[in-house]
């Protein structure tokens, strides 16, 4: 099997699977098992916060990136009305749909990426005196475009405007990043070789967010529900490995990305990812071919890719439309990598891709 769909989800490291941790106790229980679970949970929080560049008490565990995005956007804006809120046209649905749902309460501005990214200047030009919140993703999940989050944050901080970034595709992809530069950030463990069902939200000290659900008040009442201790520990263990191997993994991924850029171009593909995109994501269009047909051809040979975001794979790509590339919506494949992939896999993959393009009927 060759797996080039790591932006959708990553394979959990075997050493980090939750059933192997033994930490099934409820961390809120007062007995010895509960104490051990709480200790393990706080250790995981401390390790992850270190890699995020934030304080442990600023990291709240959730069940995934979608919940974290909703908490940041809707949780912060809950109870507020009027004013402008700003995001981009190519945000992940977890952010984009939050903003769409708030159009009756706020003036919502959707910024169009230019040359694949949303610049600090574009954000600044959209600001008004009553701007309530800005949310711009760190790395686009379909093209790999990397937005200048730190630069946007510096500008917004001078103007005292809260800033959220969806960091799901950015965290631990090539090393550490200091997320303390923003006010909120959303994370998802299964994008970092942890099991599904664990995520996190960073909330800078002093920023207030209202919970979206009520219950037992876990995670300081930010996200009620019994905390997924095995998932949190697995995520922290995976993060330890990814940080330790960050340079080696990045070099591997860069070589694979460069090879596929070259070979897919030779096969007639059009690379849609910006030149300075994250090496972990590569978007390529094959004009005249239905991307889904290529995907199934490869899948039959146990080579797995996607036609875009796994969250909206059956719809026309809003991301490509936002980037002015809508004409490629039905022709585009997304390849996404991890340090577990190899150049040999890329070579075998290109051979199968070449066969697919020779075999499948090209439409006019």
Image (cartoon, rainbow, N blue to C red):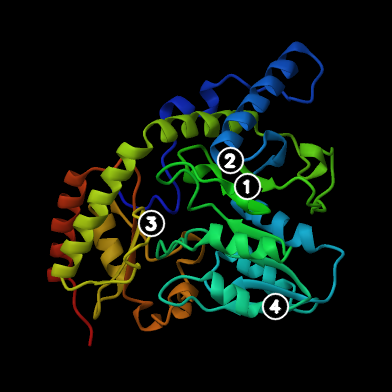
In the picture, the disc for residue 53 is: 2
The answer to which image quadrant residue 288 occupies is bottom left
Please tell me which of labels 4 and 3 falls first in the chain: 4
Q: Residue furthest front?
A: 158
Q: Residue furthest bottom?
A: 364
In the picture, the disc for residue 180 is: 1
In the picture, the disc for residue 108 is: 4
Residue occupied by mark 3: 278
Element marked by disc 1? helix
In the rendered view, would you say 168 is above or below 238? below
Q: At 44% from the left edge and 61% from the top edge, which residue is drawn? A: 146
Residue 272 shows in this picture? yes
Question: Which quarter of the rendered picture does the C terminus lie within?
Answer: bottom left
For the residues labelled 2 and 1, say whether their Cβ atoms are less than 8 Å apart.
yes
The answer to which image quadrant residue 122 occupies is bottom right
Of residues 26 and 189, the one nearer the viewer is 189
Question: Which quarter of the rendered picture does the N terminus lie within?
Answer: top left
For the residues labelled 4 and 3, say whether their Cβ atoms are less than 8 Å apart.
no
Instruction: For marks 3 and 2, give the CA distance.
Output: 20 Å
Q: Is residue 188 left or right of residue 29?
A: left
Please tell me which of labels 2 and 1 falls first in the chain: 2
Q: Is residue 58 left or right of residue 318?
A: right
Instruction: For marks 1 and 4, give the CA distance.
Output: 26 Å
Q: At 55% from the left edge and 21% from the top edge, which residue is drawn? A: 21
Please tell me which of labels 3 and 1 falls first in the chain: 1
Instruction: For marks 4 and 2, give the CA distance.
Output: 30 Å
Neighbour class for label 3 at 10 Å: few (<14), some, many (≥20)? many
Instruction: For marks 2 and 1, give the CA distance.
Output: 6 Å
Please tell me which of labels 1 and 4 falls first in the chain: 4
């Amino acid at each position: 099997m060759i797996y080039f769909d790591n932006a959708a989800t990553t394979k959990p490291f075997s050493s980090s699977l939750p059933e192997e941790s033994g930490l099934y106790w409820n961390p809120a229980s007062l007995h010895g098992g509960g104490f051990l679970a709480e200790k393990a949970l706080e250790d995981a929080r401390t390790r992850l916060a270190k890699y995020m560049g934030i304080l442990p008490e600023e990291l709240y565990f959730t069940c995934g990136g979608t919940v974290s995005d909703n908490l940041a956007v809707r949780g912060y804006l809950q109870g507020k009305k009027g004013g402008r809120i700003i995001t981009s046209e190519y945000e992940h649905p977890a952010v984009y749909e939050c903003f769409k749902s708030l159009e009756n309460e706020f003036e919502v501005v959707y910024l169009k990426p230019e040359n694949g990214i949303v610049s600090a200047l574009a954000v600044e030009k959209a600001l008004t005196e009553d701007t309530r919140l800005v949310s711009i993703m760190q790395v686009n999940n379909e093209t790999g475009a990397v937005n200048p989050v730190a630069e946007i944050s510096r500008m917004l901080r001078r103007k005292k405007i809260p800033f959220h970034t969806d960091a799901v595709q950015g965290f631990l992809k090539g090393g550490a990043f200091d997320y303390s530069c923003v006010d909120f950030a959303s994370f998802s463990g299964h994008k970092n070789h942890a099991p599904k069902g664990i995520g996190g939200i960073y909330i800078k000290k002093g920023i207030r967010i209202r919970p979206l659900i009520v219950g037992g008040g876990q995670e300081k009442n930010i996200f009620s529900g019994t905390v997924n201790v095995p998932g949190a520990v697995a995520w922290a263990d995976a993060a330890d490995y990814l940080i330790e191997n960050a340079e080696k993994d990045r070099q591997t991924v860069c070589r694979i990305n460069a090879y596929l850029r070259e070979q897919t171009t030779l096969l007639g593909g059009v690379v849609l990812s910006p030149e300075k995109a994250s090496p972990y994501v590569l978007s390529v269009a094959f004009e005249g071919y239905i991307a889904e047909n290529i995907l199934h051809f490869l899948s039959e040979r146990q080579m797995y890719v996607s036609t875009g975001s796994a969250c909206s794979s059956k719809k026309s790509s809003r991301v490509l439309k936002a980037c002015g590339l809508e004409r490629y919506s039905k022709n585009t494949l997304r390849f996404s990598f991890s340090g577990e992939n190899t150049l040999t896999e890329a070579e075998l993959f290109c051979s199968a891709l070449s066969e697919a393009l020779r075999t499948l009927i090209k439409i006019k």
